Image (tube, grey):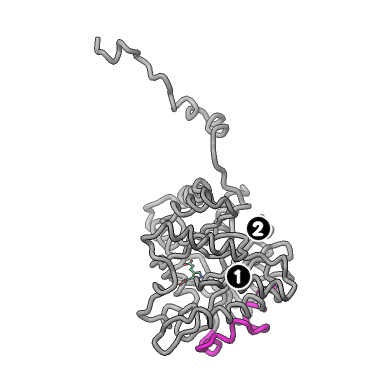
C-alpha cells in the first residue's frame, strides 16, 4: 500500500461537492450580473430617420436624434438604468477651440433633451471631452506645437459640462484627463445650481490602443492622424498612479470613478474598489467589443456565453456598473 493511501485514501475537502448540482452552484455563487449593472454607450449624429453602421463595431450604429429617442425608450423598457451619449458631428462643427462643445443647440444637447422627453426615467451620462469637436482630434485645446493646454482646456470643459447639465444630463463624465477639471466642473455646476448633477470621472483612463474602433465611430481617428494621447492619458504600465488619480478626483468632488479600458485593466478595478471603496465603474471599450465580435463571427467563441462571462468578470473584479456595447444584448438575455 502506498504511503499516501495509508494516510487517508480520501481528500479531506471536496471542492466539487458544491459544484455537483445546480441548486448548490446557485447557492454558493459569489457574484451576480444584473440589468442594473449595465450602461449602454450610444452614438448620435445629425439627420432624421438616419442610421449608419460602424464597420469596426458590428451591430453598433450611429443614430439620428429621433431614432436615438425611440431606442432610449426600448432600453428603458429592458431595465437598463443609463446610457452614455457620444455625439458624432460633421466637419463644419469642428474647430480649433471646440466652441460647438457648449452650444446649447448643439447635437449633444439636443440629443439629451430628446432622450429625456422620450424616457425621463433613463439616466443620461454625457462625455466631457473636446475630441468630437476639435479639428485635430485631441481632447483639448492645443498650442502651436500641438501640446494640449491643461487650464485652457479645463475652462472649455466647464462650459461643456454646464451646457450638458442645462440640457438635462444626469451624470457628466469627463474623459479628457486634464488635471483639476473635476474640481472646476464641480464649482461650475454648483454655482449654476446643478447641485445634484453627478460627476463620473474617467479618473483612471489609460492611453490605450483599444479605443481604435471608437475613434472610427466618432470620426476623430482621421483628424488625430499619427498623433497620440500619451501626454494626458495614463501609461498602461502604471497602477499606483491610477489610485493617485482617483484620490485627486474624489477630493475634487467626483461621485463615481471609472476605469478604462475594462478587461485588460480589471486589476485596477479591484485595487480602486478595495483601497478607495467608492462607486466604481469600468468601460469595456470599443476594441474589446470588436475583438469579441470578430471571434463570434468566425465561430471561434460562443457569443452569448462569452458576453455574459466577460461582464460577470467585471462584477467579480468589484465594478458597480459596466459601460458596454453589449448592454442591450445582455439585458435581453438577462430578461429571458
Ligand atoms: C474620448 C473618449 C474615447 C473613448 C470614450 N471617450 C476615446 C479616446 O480617448 O480616444 C473610448 C471609448 C471606446 O473605445 O469605446 N474622450
The image position of residue 108, as x and y in percent, is: 62, 77
SS class, disc 1: helix
Occupied quadrant, residue 211: bottom left
- Assess disc 2: are there few (<14), some (14-19) or many (≥20) residues with their C-alpha within 10 Å of its C-alpha: some
Tell me what residue is drawn at x 51 percent, y 73 percent: 178
- Assess disc 1: are there few (<14), some (14-19) or many (≥20) residues with their C-alpha within 10 Å of its C-alpha: some
**Residue 131 numbered tag:** none
79 or 264: nearer the eye? 264
Q: Please, what is the dominant secondary structure of the magenta stretch?
A: helix
Tell me what residue is drawn at x 57 percent, y 76 percent: 87
The image position of residue 105, as x and y in percent, is: 67, 84
Tell me what residue is drawn at x 61 percent, y 74 percent: 184
Occupied quadrant, residue 114: bottom right
Vertical position of residue 82 compared to residue 145: above or below: above
Tell me what residue is drawn at x 63 percent, y 80 percent: 159
Q: Residue furthest left?
A: 2
333 left or right of 264? right
Pointer 1 residue: 183
Tell me the magenta residue range: 90-114
Is residue 110 rendered magenta in the image?
A: yes
The image position of residue 154, as x and y in percent, is: 56, 78
75 left or right of 212? right
Vertical position of residue 23 compared to residue 320: above or below: above
* Mark nearer the N terminus (1 vs 2): 2
79 or 319: nearer the eye? 319
Pointer 2 residue: 81
Q: Quadrant of the N terminus?
A: top left
Amino acid at each position: 500500500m502506498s504511503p499516501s493511501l495509508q494516510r487517508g485514501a480520501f481528500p479531506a475537502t471536496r471542492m466539487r461537492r458544491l459544484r455537483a448540482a445546480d441548486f448548490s452552484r446557485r447557492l454558493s455563487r459569489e457574484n451576480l450580473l444584473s440589468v442594473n449593472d449595465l450602461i449602454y454607450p450610444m452614438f448620435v449624429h445629425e439627420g432624421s430617420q438616419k442610421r449608419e453602421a460602424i464597420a469596426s463595431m458590428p451591430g453598433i450604429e450611429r443614430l439620428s436624434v429621433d431614432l436615438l429617442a425611440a431606442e432610449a425608450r426600448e432600453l428603458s423598457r429592458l431595465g437598463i438604468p443609463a446610457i452614455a451619449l457620444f455625439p458624432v458631428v460633421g466637419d463644419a462643427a469642428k474647430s480649433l477651440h471646440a466652441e460647438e462643445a457648449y452650444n446649447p443647440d448643439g447635437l449633444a444637447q439636443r440629443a439629451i433633451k430628446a432622450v429625456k422627453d422620450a424616457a425621463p426615467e433613463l439616466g443620461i451620462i454625457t462625455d466631457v471631452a473636446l475630441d468630437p469637436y476639435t479639428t485635430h482630434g485631441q481632447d483639448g485645446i492645443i498650442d502651436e506645437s500641438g501640446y494640449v493646454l491643461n487650464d485652457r482646456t479645463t475652462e472649455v470643459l466647464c462650459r461643456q459640462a454646464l451646457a450638458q447639465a442645462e440640457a438635462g444630463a444626469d451624470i457628466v463624465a469627463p474623459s479628457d484627463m486634464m488635471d483639476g477639471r473635476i474640481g472646476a466642473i464641480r464649482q461650475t455646476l454648483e454655482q449654476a445650481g446643478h447641485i445634484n448633477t453627478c460627476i463620473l470621472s474617467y479618473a483612471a483612463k489609460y492611453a490605450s490602443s483599444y479605443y481604435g474602433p471608437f475613434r472610427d465611430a466618432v470620426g476623430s481617428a482621421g483628424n488625430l492622424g499619427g498623433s497620440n494621447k500619451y501626454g494626458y492619458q495614463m501609461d498602461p504600465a502604471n497602477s499606483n498612479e491610477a489610485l493617485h488619480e482617483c484620490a485627486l478626483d474624489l477630493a475634487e468632488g467626483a461621485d463615481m470613478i471609472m476605469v478604462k479600458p475594462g478587461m485588460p485593466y480589471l486589476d485596477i478595478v479591484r485595487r480602486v474598489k478595495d483601497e478607495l471603496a467608492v462607486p466604481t465603474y469600468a468601460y469595456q471599450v470599443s476594441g474589446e467589443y470588436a475583438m469579441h465580435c470578430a471571434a463570434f463571427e468566425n465561430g471561434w467563441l460562443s457569443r452569448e456565453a462569452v458576453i455574459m462571462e466577460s461582464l460577470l468578470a467585471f462584477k467579480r473584479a468589484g465594478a458597480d456598473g459596466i459601460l458596454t456595447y453589449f448592454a442591450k444584448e445582455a439585458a435581453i438575455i438577462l430578461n429571458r
